[in-house]
Amino acid sequence: MLVVLEGILWTIRFFFGACIFSFLTVVIDRLPRGENVVRGRSHCTSCGRELTVWELIPCVSFLCLGGKCRGCGERIPLRCFWTELAGGAAFIGCVTRYGCGRSGVISPRGAVIFAYLGILLVVALIDWDTQMIYDRFHIMILILAVFDFLLYPERGIMTRLIGALIISVPMLILALVIPGAFGGGDIKLMAASGLLLGTASIVCAMFIGIVTGGGYAAVMLAGKKLEKKDQFAFGPFLALGLAAAVFWGDQIAAWYLHFL
């Protein structure tokens, strides 16, 4: 009986995270177009038909509808499904890594990290679509960094301040020396995230971002889908590195230093 109840609780956690990230897909879609992200019912972007409650169940509705709008038959973007799935996985990951707290659902620090992962998702996909990172997201991360410091003072202010500078300052210098090397949004993202994650994790995040971003560029150049002078959104790869560093950054850094 306890196993069943525990399974139900984890299922609720998954769908809660999926629901939050499902809403973030609306933000990702509407914000660059200047639309209100709160008002207005969810609708099909092709035929304009308002979606029913049964069409808004994260992950489940997409599978039941076969990935198509019930009205016009237009395909629903696959990344909506993956985003919702990632939301559920992120919430479960935060509970597993940071505990469930007194509420029995998620700890306060886990909630902060989950909110941060949501911001990273929005930043990554909007940057992928528009090559733009809005300053409001940097401010949100700074606010989360303050909350995280209050909840987790063991990660001292010094490592957080160094983390805010150790990657962002070299990025800024490179951007000044080599125009277009990094965008201002990328630099501010790493500065704000460094204040949240600390020195070791932000260095790890940058390494992962460079490896994955460089790998993507190499593949695109080999396939002649990019020219050497073309620019591409680097924010998604930084976001990937930052998301990984949230869970394993300190461990990866410790593992690497062990070999020095």
Image (cartoon, rainbow, N blue to C red):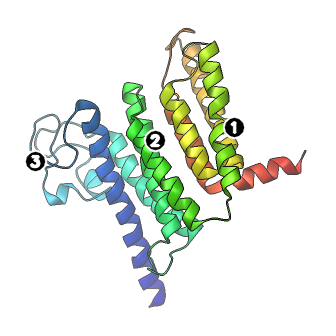
In what element is the residue under mark 1? helix
**Nearest the eye: 86 or 76:** 86
How many numbered marks, from 0 up? 3
Query: In the figure, is residue 57 to the left or right of 53?
Result: right
First in residue order: circle 3 vs circle 2: 3
Q: 10 Å neighbourhood of mark 1: few (<14), some, or many (≥20)?
A: many
Q: 10 Å neighbourhood of mark 2: few (<14), some, or many (≥20)?
A: many
**Nearest the eye: 19 or 122:** 122
For image coordinates 52% across by 56% down, the residue present is: 146
For image coordinates 68% across by 58% down, the residue present is: 156
**Nearest the eye: 91 or 112:** 112
In what element is the residue under mark 3? loop
Q: Identify the residue under disc 1.
A: 166
Query: In the figure, is residue 170 to the left or right of 8?
Result: right
For image coordinates 32% across by 59% down, the residue present is: 19
Report, in whole angstroms, how far the alpha carbon at label 1 lies from the one at label 3: 48 Å
Report, in whole angstroms, how far the alpha carbon at label 3 lies from the one at label 2: 33 Å
Q: Identify the residue under disc 2.
A: 138
Disc 2 residue type (three-letter)? His
Report, in whole angstroms, how far the alpha carbon at label 1 lies from the one at label 2: 17 Å
Q: Identify the residue under disc 3.
A: 50
Q: Quadrant of residue 179?
A: top right
Asked if residue 89 can be seen in this view, the reply is no
Asked if residue 24 can be seen in this view, the reply is yes
In what element is the residue under mark 2? helix
